[in-house]
């Protein structure tokens, strides 16, 4: 004998019912089929009952919908002759339901007992249709499963039920259909086994009838590593032990109703979770033996929302026996289900997690119990925290593995989620913890990613600024996205983007082919603060903020961004070259939050300069001297100037090629080079501020103090003088380089004429060169040379920083 249970979706449409029929007909054994109500019907009936009791109205239209759903199903499934008799039976049940609802509306009151009577109608209706459709004998679960009178969630009397079931099925062979969810008490009054209880019904039948297997047919491919509605990367678990399945369902995995496992466990009946619409998928097997070896340590993660935490705290509790006993006795008096218990080892607080709907009642009862202790001050009182969720990871193999909790809470903490309470079952089968519900999605995502080695890693990118660098970066991202996914299992998802006018967010990822149009259509006007607010509100895991602006204002948000556990990749130099104290603070914050603050492109565009300095210093080397040509723009300008190309013309070309800062004065004043030198020296481990850099300008200061237009006019007047000097330098076989030097604490930048022996002489176009003299690279300094400006290489450097964050 096999027991097959089909859930609400499986019996909820004609299309699926035809699949059910196929599945049942393919069995080569006697079968008992337990059915749920047609999908959504239980909810609908309960809503109608609630409305009737609160507003005193009986909603004819809703009732008509229920009628139509069932009648249409009958008509589609059966020949008219069979249909007629079935319709009569169904009509009788519907009339009964309508009468009950009318009664409730008149009384404006609903008791748990009445609620059970109407709630169970859904299963009576569905089984009345499905039994003849499957050519099966109908059995009345109300007569076969006996419960106590705890309506809405009755306790099963197994001794009586097992006897009734074995008697009813003695000598039976063939096909049976019975309604799930419903039972009755010893007075014959209908009860229900709790929402989702049809699974339990099936398990009770299976255990009583010594079935060879219990199959739970539902709308997903099996028991999954996490709730597939929240975690898209969740996948089917092939095998679970009874304990693991019980634990996961207890902590919220809705795929089976928690009490379901107990009856079958005692008889070691294997349970399969299968998908009605995809019967060829392997599904999940739940069984008795533990399987070691290739099994994962953690099998699944589940969660429960609408949780409140009730905490009893006070110095007077330490070492006093009986506190827990009284606490739980108080809760038991009110039949309050405690989902999690956490006690600090100092014993001065006990926290219990309960469903929010009973939190008030629970807190009152606990306060009453400890009234005396509270009055005399031994206990501070009863604290209630709302809007919480519980998350649990489950796996039998956790017992043999050390360090799981460490890894777990490190991962969660790194993503900025605050854990309110933690509990680990003594069996070490699960670790559960309480968090704010607003952090739930993020927590499930990070934990799933880190423990289930999901097939790929994901970074969520927020990009501010789509000018030359930002725009180029998105082009590169579009080109690389697929390849990175396929070859590196890295998913880079753009979830927020802004230019100076508008901003756009999409947690599922913004289409990179059309981001520009989408951004233009966005109704959100671009404001830095609100971009940051949106980003933090989205609260996504593995978030990275990419700053491709040159704005100082944006950098004011770096600290709160890092504090929200979001990494920063900055092409913007302002922050790293701001005051030394701010630079340190940002680095320290990133470190303490476990996120990254990277700005490789601040010096030498895409050249690996900062990462090299870091590698050297991390390995114990010491940077003694830095000599560098750091301005691609200035180098381009000096290389372009000739007897035919004047200074002003060369500057214009630098701007046109996108080498210079949008305002070229930043390059020409030497400010840009000073910033870069500061960053280099700081990365090399020196504490240095801008005032300590000695700058020799080559353009009169006055030109930097007025408007940009005045600057362009003024610079033209310098052309002749510059050409004269340039010709002289050239005649001496030298060339101009704007060189930054840092030597044991002394920093200066100046325009120098270098001869052909200098490593700086042969430096084409906009190239940069950096010479690092270190304790190890002493006689021959390390030399890094290449393009030092340009949108393409800078964007590539941004990309490299992101890859560093992905740690690939
Ligand atoms: P049925 O009506 O067949 O009893 P349910 O809706 O009660 O189906 O349970 C199946 C649903 O449980 C799935 O559609 C899925 O959304 C949800 N679910 C939550 N957690 C899990 C999980 N870990 N594995 C599979 N499904 C889950
Ligand atoms: N129909 C009931 C419910 O919706 C029982 C079940 O489907 O398992 O809760
Ligand atoms: Mg269910």
Image (cartoon, rainbow, N blue to C red):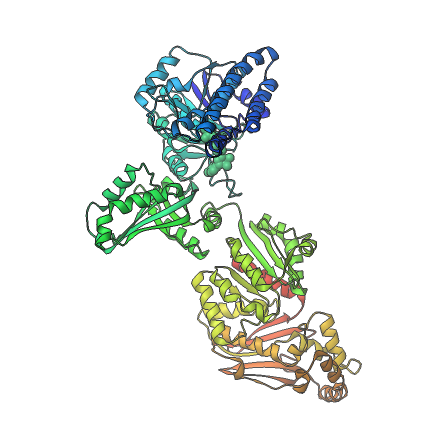
Residue 304 in picture, x, y percent from top left: 42, 42
Placement of 449 over or under 122, stated as above or below: below
Q: Tell me if residue 286 can be seen.
A: yes
x 36%, y 39%: residue:
396
Image position of 251 (left or right of 704): left
List x then y, in percent, for residue 262. 35, 29
Say which residue appears at 58% left-offset and 58% top-offset. Answer: 462
The answer to which of 107 and 246 lies nearer the viewer is 107
Q: Quadrant of the N terminus?
A: top left
Residue 63 position by quadrant:
top right
The reply to whether residue 209 is visible in this rendering is no
Rendered residue at 36%/15% (across/down): 166
| 153 versus 717 height, above or below | above
Outermost residue, right direction? 644
Q: Is residue 211 left or right of residue 234?
A: left
Q: Position of residue 635 (x, y in %)?
A: 67, 77
Residue at point 48%, 22% (across, down): 99
Q: Quadrant of residue 728?
A: bottom right
Q: Position of residue 506 (x, y in %)?
A: 60, 51
Please tell me in which quadrant of the rendered image residue 115 appears. Answer: top left
- Marks counted in the figure total 0
Q: Nearer the viewer, residue 152 or 95?
A: 95
């Amino acid at each position: 004998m096999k027991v097959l249970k089909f859930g609400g979706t499986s019996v909820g449409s004609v299309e699926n019912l035809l699949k059910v029929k196929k599945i049942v007909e393919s069995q080569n054994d006697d079968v008992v089929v337990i059915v749920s109500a047609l999908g959504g019907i239980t909810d609908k009936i309960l809503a109608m009952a609630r409305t009737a009791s609160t507003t005193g109205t009986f909603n004819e239209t809703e009732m008509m919908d229920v009628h139509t759903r069932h009648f249409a199903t009958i008509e589609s499934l059966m020949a008219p002759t069979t249909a007629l008799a079935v319709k009569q039976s169904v009509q009788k049940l519907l009339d009964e339901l309508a009468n009950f609802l009318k009664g409730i509306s008149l009384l404006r009151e609903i008791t748990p007992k009445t609620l059970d009577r109407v709630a169970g109608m859904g299963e009576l209706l569905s089984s009345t249709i499905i039994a003849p459709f499957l050519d099966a004998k109908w059995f009345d679960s109300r007569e076969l499963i006996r419960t106590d009178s705890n309506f809405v969630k009755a306790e099963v009397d197994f001794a009586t039920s097992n006897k009734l079931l074995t008697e009813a099925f003695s000598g039976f062979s063939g096909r049976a259909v019975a309604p799930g969810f419903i039972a009755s008490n010893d007075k014959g009054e209908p009860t229900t086994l709790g929402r989702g209880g049809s699974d339990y019904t099936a398990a009770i039948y299976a255990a009583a009838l010594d079935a060879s297997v219990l199959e739970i047919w539902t709308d997903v491919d099996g028991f999954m590593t996490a709730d597939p509605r929240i975690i898209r990367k969740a996948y089917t678990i092939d095998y679970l032990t009874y304990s693991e399945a019980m634990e996961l369902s207890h902590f919220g995995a809705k795929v089976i109703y928690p009490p379901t496992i107990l009856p079958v466990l005692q008889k070691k009946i294997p349970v399969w979770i299968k998908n009605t619409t995809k019967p060829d998928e392997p599904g999940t097997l739940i069984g008795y033996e533990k399987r070691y070896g290739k099994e994962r340590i953690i099998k699944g993660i589940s969660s429960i929302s609408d949780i409140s935490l009730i905490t009893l705290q006070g110095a007077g509790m330490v070492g006093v026996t009986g506190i827990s006993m009284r606490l739980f006795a108080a809760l038991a008096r009110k039949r309050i289900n405690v989902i999690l218990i956490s006690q600090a080892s100092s014993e001065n607080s006990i926290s219990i997690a309960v469903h929010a709907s009973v939190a008030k009642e629970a807190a009152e009862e606990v306060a009453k119990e400890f009234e005396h202790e509270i009055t005399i001050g031994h206990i501070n009182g009863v604290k209630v925290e709302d809007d919480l969720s519980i998350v649990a990871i489950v796996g039998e193999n956790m017992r043999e593995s050390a360090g799981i909790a460490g890894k777990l809470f490190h991962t969660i903490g790194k993503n900025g989620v605050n854990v309110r309470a933690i509990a680990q079952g003594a069996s070490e089968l699960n670790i559960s913890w309480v968090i704010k519900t607003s952090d739930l999605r993020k927590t499930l995502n990070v934990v799933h990613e880190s423990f289930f080695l999901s097939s790929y890693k994901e970074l969520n990118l927020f990009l501010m600024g789509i000018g030359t660098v930002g725009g180029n970066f998105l082009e590169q991202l579009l080109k690389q996205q697929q390849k990175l996914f396929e070859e590196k299992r890295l998913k880079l998802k753009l979830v927020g983007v802004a230019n100076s006018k508008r901003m756009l967010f999409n947690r599922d990822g913004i289409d990179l082919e059309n981001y520009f149009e989408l951004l233009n259509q966005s109704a959100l006007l671009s404001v830095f603060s609100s971009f940051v607010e949106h980003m933090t509100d989205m609260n996504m895991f593995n978030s990275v903020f990419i700053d491709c602006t040159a704005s100082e204002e944006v950098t004011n948000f770096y600290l709160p961004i890092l504090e929200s556990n979001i990494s920063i990749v900055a092409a913007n130099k302002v922050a790293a070259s701001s005051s030394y104290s701010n630079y340190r603070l940002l680095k320290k914050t990133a470190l303490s939050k476990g996120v990254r603050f990277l700005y490789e492109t601040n010096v030498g565009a895409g050249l690996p300069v900062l990462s090299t300095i870091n590698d050297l210093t991390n390995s114990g080397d010491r940077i003694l001297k830095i000599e560098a040509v750091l301005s691609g723009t200035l180098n381009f300008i000096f290389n372009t100037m000739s007897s035919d190309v004047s200074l002003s013309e060369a500057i214009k070309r630098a701007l046109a090629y996108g080498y210079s800062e949008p305002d070229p004065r930043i390059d020409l004043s030497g400010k840009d080079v000073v910033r870069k030198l500061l960053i280099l020296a700081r990365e090399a481990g020196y504490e240095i501020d801008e005032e300590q850099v000695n700058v020799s300008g080559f353009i009169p200061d006055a030109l930097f103090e007025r408007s940009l237009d005045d600057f362009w006019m003024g610079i033209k007047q310098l052309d002749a003088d510059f050409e004269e000097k340039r010709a002289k330098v050239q005649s001496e076989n030298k060339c101009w380089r704007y060189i930054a030097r840092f030597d044991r604490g002394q920093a200066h930048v100046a325009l120098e004429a270098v001869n052909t022996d200098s490593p700086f002489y042969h430096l084409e176009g906009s190239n940069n060169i950096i010479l690092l003299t270190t304790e190890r690279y002493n006689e021959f300094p390390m030399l890094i040379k290449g393009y030092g400006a340009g949108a393409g290489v800078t964007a590539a450097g941004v990309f490299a920083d992101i890859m560093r964050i992905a740690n690939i």
